[in-house]
Amino acid sequence: MRNRPKVRSAWIYYKLRLNRMTGAEIGRKLGVSTSLVCQVIRGEWPNPRVRRAVAEALGLPYKKVWREEDRGH
């Protein structure tokens, strides 16, 4: 259970690479730091705006990327 965020973030980074997208590109698009995007992907910071942008970059619905258990931050 404890490594679930690591598995999720690895999956997100993998899918971003498949889509030829990076956290830096998402950050530039939103006007936020790459660090913030990475923190959100790793589950350290529940920023809804960044989460939406990541889901869009993946071409997936928000709920598929950010499951319910991740929203309780």
Image: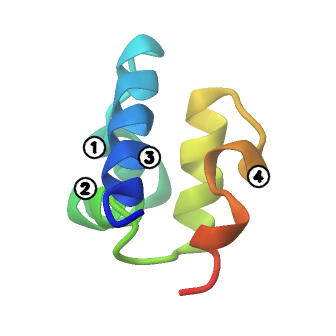
Q: Please state which of the two labelled residues, at mark 3 or mark 4, is closer to the viewer.
A: 3
> In the image, what residue occupies the spot 35% across and 38% down?
25
Q: Are marks 3 and 4 in contact (CB under 8 Å)?
A: no
In percent of width and height, residue 22 lies at 32, 33
Q: Amino acid at mark 3?
A: Arg
In percent of width and height, residue 30 lies at 48, 57
Q: Please state which of the two labelled residues, at mark 3 or mark 2, is closer to the viewer.
A: 3
Q: Earlier in the sequence, mark 1 or mark 3?
A: 3
Inter-mark Cα distance, 3 to 4: 13 Å
Secondary element under disc 4, as helix, strand or loop, is: helix
Q: Please state which of the two labelled residues, at mark 4 or mark 1, is closer to the viewer.
A: 4
> In the image, what residue occupies the spot 34% across and 75% down?
44
Inter-mark Cα distance, 1 to 3: 19 Å
Q: Earlier in the sequence, mark 2 or mark 4?
A: 2
Residue to which mark 1 is pinned? 24
Q: Are marks 1 and 2 in contact (CB under 8 Å)?
A: yes
Residue to which mark 2 is pinned? 34
In percent of width and height, residue 68 lies at 72, 67
Residue to which mark 4 is pinned? 63
Secondary element under disc 1, as helix, strand or loop, is: helix
Which quadrant is home to the N terminus? bottom left
Q: Amino acid at mark 4?
A: Lys
Please indicate whether residue 61 sits to the left or right of residue 42 in the image. right
Q: Are marks 4 and 1 in contact (CB under 8 Å)?
A: no
Please indicate whether residue 67 sits to the left or right of residue 13 in the image. right
Q: Amino acid at mark 1?
A: Ala
Q: Earlier in the sequence, mark 3 or mark 2?
A: 3
Secondary element under disc 2, as helix, strand or loop, is: helix
